[in-house]
């Protein structure tokens, strides 16, 4: 297999694992809070990946610049978790994942408006598909979600913003020090520090609820998200962002399948939601192909 083919395979595994993390988090949050699943996921990442670093030879020599970049990336990853899991609680795993996957639209908008890059026909078509998909996903959502508020849509969009910035930062850092396992573990330490600071200073932090049923689901969330981080990092360590990102952004489709199987009594999925998710994913792929 070529390096691009392996990168694409790892990106697909990333999408499936991240979708599984969103679905299992929704199951657990029936009895707990987004802050709790965020903390559990970060702890699982640290324990599993630092153990792997130890058993594979310990901490490698890496570039100080790369370490600084991954301090930023780890902080952003903590933000992705908080926004994503809170979004899952507020609007459901399927809706939240579709909105979170618009990160290519955000990066394309920045490239066109700030960097002056041309808007190709595929980018324009992809933008139309993404916007249309968002409209379908969120249209009259208050009828299906009794506690729905429009600002809830900003939670997964915030996660998408962080994700859109993380991919190119990771790729550049790997050009300086190609150590995906170590930096995956290092991100866990940075995310944990950021979460503790957030818990200390935030006036709107949620309670940590250690419900036994929720913890089993959250442990699965941590495993799935840790795998998704490790696979996306490994993929970006040798694969091109334009090859990896559109496949990794297909997780709404897998989240929809998981929600249909495991969240039938928790989350209502309509034809409008399905069409909206497929439109967002198609638009995401078109934006990347149009670069």
Image (spheres, rainbow, N blue to C red):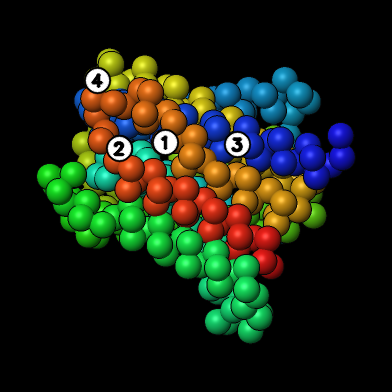
Residue 99, x across and y down, in percent? 41, 53
Q: Which mark is residue 269?
A: 2
Residue 242, x across and y down, in percent? 70, 57
Looking at marks 1 and 2 on the same chain, the residue that comes earlier in the sequence is marked by 1
**Disc 3 + disc 1, Cβ < 8 Å:** no
Residue 96, x across and y down, in percent? 36, 46
SS for dot 2 = loop
Q: Residue at x 62, y 28 (%)?
A: 50
Q: Which one is nearer the viewer's eye here, 44 or 24?
A: 24
Looking at marks 3 and 1 on the same chain, the residue that comes earlier in the sequence is marked by 3
Q: Which mark is residue 168?
A: none
Question: Which residue in the structure is indicated by mark 1?
Answer: 256
Q: Quadrant of residue 119?
A: bottom right
Looking at marks 3 and 4 on the same chain, the residue that comes earlier in the sequence is marked by 3
SS for dot 1 = helix
Closer mark to the observer between disc 4 and disc 1: 1
Q: CA distance from mark 4 to mark 1?
A: 26 Å
Q: Which mark is residue 211?
A: 4
Q: Residue at x 63, y 84 (%)?
A: 116
Question: Which residue in the structure is indicated by mark 3?
Answer: 14
Please identify the residue farthest to the front as the structure is shown: 271
């Amino acid at each position: 297999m070529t390096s691009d083919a392996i990168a694409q395979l790892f990106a697909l595994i990333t999408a499936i694992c991240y979708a599984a993390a969103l679905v299992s988090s929704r199951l657990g949050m029936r009895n707990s809070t987004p802050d709790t699943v965020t903390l559990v996921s970060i702890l699982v990442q640290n324990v599993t990946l630092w153990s792997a670093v130890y058993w594979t030879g310990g901490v490698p020599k890496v570039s100080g610049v790369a370490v600084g970049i991954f301090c930023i990336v780890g902080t952003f990853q903590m933000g992705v978790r908080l926004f994503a899991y809170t979004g899952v609680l507020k609007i459901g795993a399927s809706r939240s994942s579709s909105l979170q996957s618009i990160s290519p639209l955000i990066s394309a908008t920045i490239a066109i408006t700030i960097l002056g890059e041309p808007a190709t026909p595929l980018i324009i078509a992809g933008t139309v598909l993404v916007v249309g998909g968002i409209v379908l996903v969120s249209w009259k959502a208050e009828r299906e979600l009794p506690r729905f508020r429009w600002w809830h849509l900003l939670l997964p969009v915030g996660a998408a913003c962080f994700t859109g910035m993380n991919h190119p930062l990771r790729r550049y850092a790997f050009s300086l020090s190609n150590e995906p396992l170590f930096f995956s573990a290092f991100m866990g330490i940075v995310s944990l520090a950021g979460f503790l600071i957030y818990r200390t200073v935030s006036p709107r932090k949620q309670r940590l609820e250690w419900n036994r049923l929720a913890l089993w689901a959250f442990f699965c969330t941590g495993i799935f998200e840790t795998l998704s981080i490790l696979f996306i990092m490994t993929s970006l360590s040798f694969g091109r962002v334009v090859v990896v990102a559109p496949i990794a952004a297909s997780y709404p489709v897998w989240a929809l399948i998981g929600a249909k199987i495991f969240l039938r009594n928790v989350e209502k999925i309509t034809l409008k939601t399905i069409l909206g998710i497929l439109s967002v994913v198609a638009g995401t792929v078109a934006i990347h192909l149009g670069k």
